[in-house]
Every structure is written in structure tokens, then in C-alpha cells.
Amino acid sequence: MENNCIFCKIAAKEIPSNVVYEDDKMIVFHDISPAAPVHVLAIPKKHIDSVLALTAEDESLMGHMMRVMANVAADLGVDEKGFRIVTNTKEDGGQTVNHLHFHLIGGRSMQWPPG
Ligand code: AMP
Ligand code: ZN
């Protein structure tokens, strides 16, 4: 647990969240400020600052998270029309919480490129 990390606290259930999936390695919960009809966040339970901090040991965790997110997308009903998975990284990427997280966003048509 990283000091004062809000997502470590969500993973530890010290801060409540609306959980849609959980296992020993990761948790998926609804974003508190949804940007679309479907907007959940997938995080590893262990603290990782961002994709920049990943090591070779995290490769199976990342593969697991991707597969789970695809299953969650289907559970939430956005697999047919599609969705987007995004990980904002550092200042230019717009990262506001420094614990690796993937936004899974869907339920409406997305624009490209993002703003
Ligand atoms: P980012 O700006 O990419 O770092 O994404 C952080 C996301 O976390 C934002 O979409 C926030 O709305 C979301 N968020 C912040 N605090 C909470 C919380 N307590 N529960 C759920 N989502 C949160
Ligand atoms: Zn953390």
C-alpha cells in the first residue's frame, strides 16, 4: 500500500467503491465521475505508479487485466457496439491518480483523436 494512494485504499476497501469485478490481483469499479454511460476503472491491487513503472514480472498481470476487461465489457453490454480502454500517463496524458488504472468507457460513440 502506497501512502495516501486513493486507489490502494479502494483496493483495500478502506474507501468504498461500486465494484463490478474482483479477484486476488485486480479490481474493477465504477468511476465516480463517469464520462460515458459505461465508465469503469480496472486497477491492479498492488501499487504501480503507471505503465512506465511496469517490470517483466508484471507481464502476466497485464495480460490477465486485459482479458478480464474484455469480459467486463461483455458483462456491461458494450461488447457488441464497442468501447475504449485508456490509460492516461503523467502530465500530458492527463493522469490525476498515480496508481495504474485502465478506463473502460462505452455506451456512446467516441471521438478520435481525443482532446
Ligand atoms: P485519470 O485522470 O486518468 O488519472 O483518472 C482518474 C479517475 O479516477 C477519474 O476518472 C476520476 O473520476 C476517478 N476517481 C477518482 N476518485 C475516485 C473514487 N473515489 N472512486 C471512483 N473513481 C474515482
Ligand atoms: Zn496505489
Image (cartoon, rainbow, N blue to C red):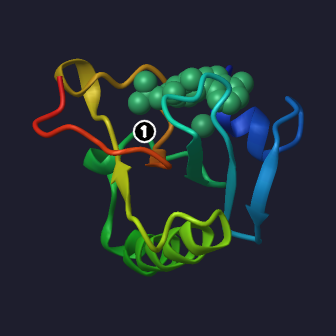
Question: Looking at the picture, how far across and down is residue 84, in whole percent?
Answer: 35, 54
Residue 85 lies left or right of residue 32; in this view the side is left
Residue 39 lies left or right of residue 86; in this view the side is right
**Residue at the extreme left:** 113
Q: Is residue 5 visible?
A: no
Question: Looking at the picture, how far across and down is residue 113, in whole percent?
Answer: 10, 36
Q: Helix, strand, or loop for circle 1? A: loop
Q: Amino acid at mark 1?
A: Asp
Question: Looking at the picture, how far across and down is residue 29, in whole percent?
Answer: 71, 47
Residue 42 lies left or right of residue 20; in this view the side is left
**What crowding class fits label 1: few (fewer than 14 Cα within 10 Å), some (14-19), or many (20 or more)?**
some
Residue 25 lies left or right of residue 58; in this view the side is right
Question: Looking at the picture, how far across and down is residue 109, in whole percent?
Answer: 33, 45
- Rendering quarter of residue 8: top right
Q: Nearer the viewer, residue 97 or 18?
A: 18
* Residue name at image x 22 percent, y 28 percent: 93
* Residue name at image x 58 percent, y 77 percent: 71
Residue that badge 1 annotates: 49
* Residue name at image x 31 percent, y 35 percent: 88
* Residue name at image x 32 percent, y 64 percent: 55
Q: Is residue 109 visible?
A: yes
Instruction: Locate the N terminus and report the quarter of the image it occupies.
Output: top right
- Rendering quarter of residue 50: top left
Q: Nearer the viewer, residue 25 or 22?
A: 22
Instruction: Locate the C terminus and report the quarter of the image it occupies.
Output: top left
